[in-house]
Image: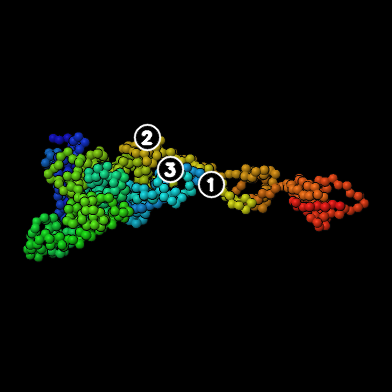
Amino acid sequence: MMNTNDIVFALDIGTRVVVGIVATENNGKLEILASEQMEHQERAMFDGQVHDIDKVAHVILSIKEKLENTLKIKLREVAIAAAGRSLKTQFARAEKSLAEDHEITLEDIHSLELEALEIAHKSIVSKSGITDYHTVGYTVSNYYLNGLPIANLKGHRGKEMAVEILATFLPFDVVEGLYASVKKSGLEVSYITLEPIAAINVSLKPDIRMLNIALVDIGAGTSDIAISKEGNIIAYSMVPYAGDEISEEIARHFLTDFATAEKIKKSTKKEIKFKDVLGIEHTISREEVLEVIKPSVKTLAQKICEEIVKYNGKSPSAVFLVGGSSNLPMLPEEIASFLKLPPNRVSVRDIKSVEILHSRPKKLKGPESITPIGIAYSAMINKRKDFVKVYVEDKLVKIFNIKSPTVMDALLAIDYSSQNLIPQSGKDLTFTLNGEKMTIKGEEGIPPKIYVNGTLANLKTSIKEGDRISIIGGKKGKDAFITVRDLVKGAENKEIYVNGKLADPDYSIKEGDEIRVEDSIKSFSITVNGKEVLLKGKREYMFIDLFNFIDIKLDNNRVPEMKINGKKASYTDLLHPGDVIEII
């Protein structure tokens, strides 16, 4: 009997069909040992989501037993994928004011991105009312410095930085519905991914992902979209319109049940025979069917293209189609037309384009095989782990294992506030000095430190099963503090008024204080009888004070004649800089 530790059992639980694959690794490639597929007897799933757990579990169990009988093994674990229907994609922007002369660090940028993710999550929750989501991932759309776009914030200084992201989330209940169906069939989930990711893993080589490619997995209930650019998946989305809508149009037009409409849709014969719901037999041509479905196919193409442009911002370089309904006639041509692409830039990917296969099985041929093969391959290269379990401050956290998880993913899973990672600066001190508003900045705080297994880390540090994450709190900066003496040069020789009252030069300035500083001793020059005289030592001078600075002989019996700037003066007149004095 085969060792089940060396195999991967993968299920593609679709809206219409469930496909099961058992495979193993052979020199780094996927070798498929057996495959089975079965349609749901009744509509137990809608738009990629489980609605009747028992009915879905029955189909899974049937496929499981067939594969076990074929391979003479017992299957206990399975890899699955969640459909793109349930993905919630949200744009978000986060902004942060910067301290003067602060140089932006990577930690600042990562904290800002985490804040944007929190904003995106809150927005999704407010729209849907669902509170529990797995974070699938995010892509930075733009960075901004002082309101202007910038490629890289690191090392810059400014008043404000901002980031815009495109984040994707998956509701917990979608995952739980899949888990429940699998468990009822006697299996445990060993690995879970997303259908668009699974399809991309086998249909787009890493070097092709550098291009701007849209991959569309068109199933029965949904058309799942993933967009790649510069080596990364920048967006996921979906259209709740796919193959079922085409079948329903056929059923309406020819008055058939859904199963008959499906057969008519899939038939490639020139003449197609069927019975309508009244039991009347009909023979129609393939051309008649194409004419009936043409408007629905055009609508499907338009909806897919609008969603691609919405998240890509423009038409991509190419579009790859997978999934059973990608075989719909006229669909590639309609998509190329809407996106204004050459027809050869829209391609249906089938098993011939999959390079990770050791051999090509006979049962799996068309584009509908891409996703189940992708699930098996993704499970193989990710060691079949559905969730990565780590500890944050001794609290167990489960992280959805669809990409290489980081510290940021773990903190998001426990709703850790990004504000806790931002160093707290001391309070600024604002006051007025001689009527002019002044602000003294508080001291910058020391940021918290993140450790993974005792080693210094950051938000983007990769984590693995069993890792322990701890966060050592930072230190708040000191509040701004300054005395009048530190603020005003030569304050000891000046008169200091705080809020209208005379104060000491060592006074510690408080928030909102009004400071007025005046010279306590004035000195200036005047002219006396044609000679310059410097007055110093007092705040103000009367005419009589002048006699302390000049040597003049007066007749004791005569009152001198005194003038200031040509006008008669008295001993108590105040003197001013530049006055011309005459004493006769």
User: Which comes before the other along the chain, label 3 or label 1?
Assistant: 3
| In this picture, residue 63 sits left or right of residue 474 | left
Separation of marks 3 and 2 at Cα, in angstroms = 27 Å
Identified by mark 3, the residue type is Lys
| In this picture, residue 61 sits left or right of residue 404 | left
Percent coordinates x, y for residue 462 in the rendering = 34, 39
Q: Residue at x 15, y 48 (%)?
A: 37
- Mark 2 lies on residue: 453
Identified by mark 1, the residue type is Lys
User: Which comes before the other along the chain, label 3 or label 2?
Assistant: 3
Q: Residue at x 79, y 52 (%)?
A: 580
Quarter of the figure with the N terminus = top left
User: Which comes before the other along the chain, label 2 or label 1?
Assistant: 1
Q: Residue at x 53, y 43 (%)?
A: 443
Q: Label 1: few (<14), some or many (≥20) within 10 Å?
A: some
Disc 2 vs disc 1: which is toward the camera?
1
Viewer-nearest residue: 113 or 118: 113
Identified by mark 2, the residue type is Asn
**Mark number for residue 427?**
1
The quadrant in which residue 78 appears is top left
Compared with 395, 498 (above or below) is: below
Percent coordinates x, y for residue 187 in the rendering = 20, 43
- Mark 3 lies on residue: 154
Q: Residue at x 84, y 52 (%)?
A: 583
